[in-house]
Image (cartoon, rainbow, N blue to C red):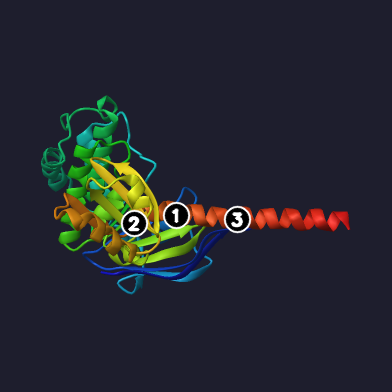
Amino acid sequence: MTLQIKNVTKRFGDKVAVDDLSMTVAPGEVMGLIGQNGAGKTTSFRMILDFIQAEQGTITWDGEKITQKTKQLIGFLPEERGLYQKMTVEDQIMYFAELHGMKRSDARIKVAEWMKRVEVIGKPTDKVQTLSKGNAQKVQFIATLIHEPKFLILDEPFTGLDPVNTEILRNEIKKSRDNGAAVIFSNHNMSDVELLSDNLLMLKDGKTILNGTVQDIRESYGRTRIYLEDGVSDDDLLAISGVKSVTKQGGGRSIKLVNAEVGREIFQKVALKGYVQAFVQAPPSLDEIFRMEVAEKDAEKVDIVRDEQVERLIGGNK
């Protein structure tokens, strides 16, 4: 079952929250939806779930409008967590499972299995309010996936988790994907997005500014980053035309290039000794691209405001 969003726009008064959004998420694929706070991600999720209505465009799943019946096949983990603190873990998860059509007896069996799979510290009979924040988050994650949804919407699923527990949940998302679920995944940590996503869509002020496979998007920026472990001095590297910067990174250095071709000259220089400990030329990371896009767009806004202020000043002095 494929989710298809075509030319969807949503306004709140004079503000355009989502502007002409289009995306397709097929079974067995993970779509990373990224953007700053207020970019339109949560609004997009709410329109998909029919919580709010779009002014224009269509949202379909398997060619049909999403109905209450099809919602039972969806697993939604909102950014705002919503567990009933005085319920037991078991009752909490079974409650959500029954809402999605599972039999209570089947859900009860699955609860213990899932708690073991994602390593929840606690017992099914413990009250939610006794759990740590991380374990409570795992419980809500279980409640989202226990009914084996065909379509997953995950809004910041790893917030507050350490790397080990993040990896546990990431692996469960991959299992759902491998079992044929379509997944939309939002996260502020670009490393997590890059590790998990097949395709990527970036929103800025409701507009789509990046859309494609993660690798294609990265490659479109050129292989302008080099990681180097070698004895050549920073000054010698900076003397090469086209080298923008050299900074320490771990046991080596990160080199930013004006264009990918500069990498050949750097390699020839460091290879004169006959042995290079490490030389990797790659596109910018997703985190760098995110920062570049945000900074570039914000800089454009500053320039527009500055130009308008200058025009008003000149006009007032005439």
Is 82 positioned to the left or the right of 151 in the image? right
Residue 14 location in percent, x, y? 63, 58
Q: In which quarter of the image is the C terminus?
A: bottom right
Residue 245 location in percent, x, y? 39, 50
Mark 2 / mark 1, whichever is N-terminal: 2
Which residue is nearer to you in this view: 318 or 49? 318
Mark 1 / mark 3, whichever is N-terminal: 1
Please state which amino acid type lies under the numbered disc 3.
Answer: Lys
Q: Quadrant of the N terminus?
A: bottom left
Q: Is mark 1 on a helix, strand or loop?
A: helix
Question: Which residue is painted at 31% across and 41% down in the image?
Answer: 248
The answer to whether residue 151 is visible is no
Q: CA–CA distance between discs 1 and 3?
A: 14 Å
Q: CA–CA distance between discs 2 and 3?
A: 24 Å
Question: Which residue is painted at 63% across and 56% down in the image?
Answer: 303
Please state which amino acid type lies under the numbered disc 1.
Answer: Met
Label 2 packing within 10 angstroms: few (<14), some (14-19), many (20+): many
Residue 274 location in percent, x, y? 14, 55
The residue tagged 3 is 301
Q: What element carries label 3?
A: helix
Is 6 positioned to the left or the right of 160 in the image? right
Label 3 packing within 10 angstroms: few (<14), some (14-19), many (20+): few
The answer to whether residue 283 is visible is yes
Q: What element carries label 2?
A: loop
Q: Report which quarter residue 141 is drawn in.
A: top left
Q: CA–CA distance between discs 2 and 1?
A: 10 Å
Mark carried by residue 284: 2
Label 1 packing within 10 angstroms: few (<14), some (14-19), many (20+): few
The residue tagged 1 is 292
